[in-house]
Image (cartoon, rainbow, N blue to C red):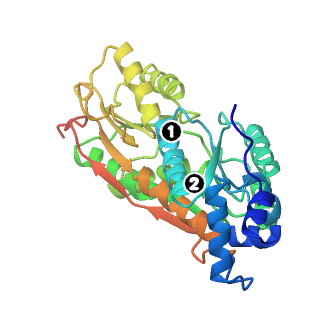
Amino acid sequence: MSSSPSTLQQVADAAGVSVSTASRALAGKAREYRISSRTEAAVQQAAQKLKFRPSRTAQALRSQKTGLLGVVVPDVANPFFAAIAREVTRAAEENGYAVLLADTGEQTATEQRAVEQFLSRQVEGLVVCPVGHESRHLQRLEAAGIPLVHVDRGFSDGSTVTVTSEHTLGAAQLTRLLIEAGHRHIGIVQGEPGTLPNEERLEGVQSEFERAGIEWDPEQIVGTHFSEESGYRAAGMLLKSGKKSLTALFAFSNQIALGCMRAIREAELTVPGDLSLVTFDDHPFAEYVATPLTVASQNVSEIGRTAARLLIDQMTSGKKPRKKVHRIPVQIHQRGSIASIES
């Protein structure tokens, strides 16, 4: 039968000191409380001999620090958000923190409940990839002084520390590639209307249309979510709308691109023979499909690492960074999904 775990009292008795002295010595606070090196060594030797393991719960109660971070994402099955969560978790573990993860299913009400539950678990900080429509519950966290970093969608008021991509520039660069290949009739398969990435990507597309003198047709902007199903329905709608002049589609996420590809195949069309296709977001499949996709690739690793660093810096310093919005550059990968159009 295994023996019961050793207690702090037993360590203190073995070292011939008080429980408070043993606790401070084991917590690395010997110099702070003027505990001699000899006493500190005696406590550490006693703890090692007794195989003492400090209680994390007791430590949290004494220090009011739990060593927990909360990560909230809209869809953990989406490779983009899964990668964000992975990078934040890695950085957290490197700094001695554990991570609690919540998937909101793209529902603001679920996001609010997840945040409340994490606060009840006394997380020391939160990385939130918001659904992107409602921010009042997150503003209350700011007001309460809880370390918080928004990732990806964020909000345009610029009050919260936010890490996101260069959406406008990336979308403009992809649009320019289509225009330079002769395309003038481009369908836009958007994500969640009203969210920061969606609106900034629309701005990028529109700026290039205006520069090239192309009419901005709202009827060629379709889609309701950053999901495969939304991409499938929206692309199908465009292809069945009778717009025979449509020569290209711009999908606003890799999941949307998957849905577009399904709709294109069902319409018995090919990429890029009948229809060119570009997408914001790379994906492991994008380079290996029959026609490799041209993409604006977000640096997901850098986004996640930056978010974790900004959160941990807030937690350790007690101060927010002066710079609130951190934009990570995107990279354009030109592959084979754009065909040239004869003028």
Whether tag 2 and tag 1 are in contact, CB under 8 A, the answer is no
Report the front residue among 176 and 150.
150
- The reply to whether residue 161 is visible in this rendering is no
The residue that label 1 is drawn on is 190
Report the front residue among 72 and 339.
72
Label 2 sits on a secondary structure element that is: strand
Q: Answer with left or right where residue 212 lies relative to residue 82.
A: left
Measured as percent of width and height from the top left, residue 48 is found at 61, 58
Q: Answer with left or right where residue 119 lies relative to residue 256.
A: right
The residue that label 2 is drawn on is 151
Report the front residue among 114 and 232.
114
Residue displayed at 25% across by 30% down: 288
- Give the image quarter of residue 262: top left
- The reply to whether residue 211 is visible in this rendering is yes
Residue at the extreme bottom: 34
Residue displayed at 65% across by 71% down: 42
Q: Answer with left or right where residue 25 lies relative to residue 210.
A: right
Disc 2 marks a residue whose amino acid type is Val
Q: Nearer the viewer, mark 2 or mark 1?
A: 2
Measured as percent of width and height from the top left, residue 218 is found at 52, 40
User: For the residues marked 2 and 1, what is the alpha-carbon distance in whole angstroms?
Assistant: 19 Å
Disc 1 marks a residue whose amino acid type is Gln
* Disc ID at residue 43: none
The mark nearer the N terminus, 2 or 1, is: 2
Tell me if residue 30 comes above or below residue 95 in the rendering: below
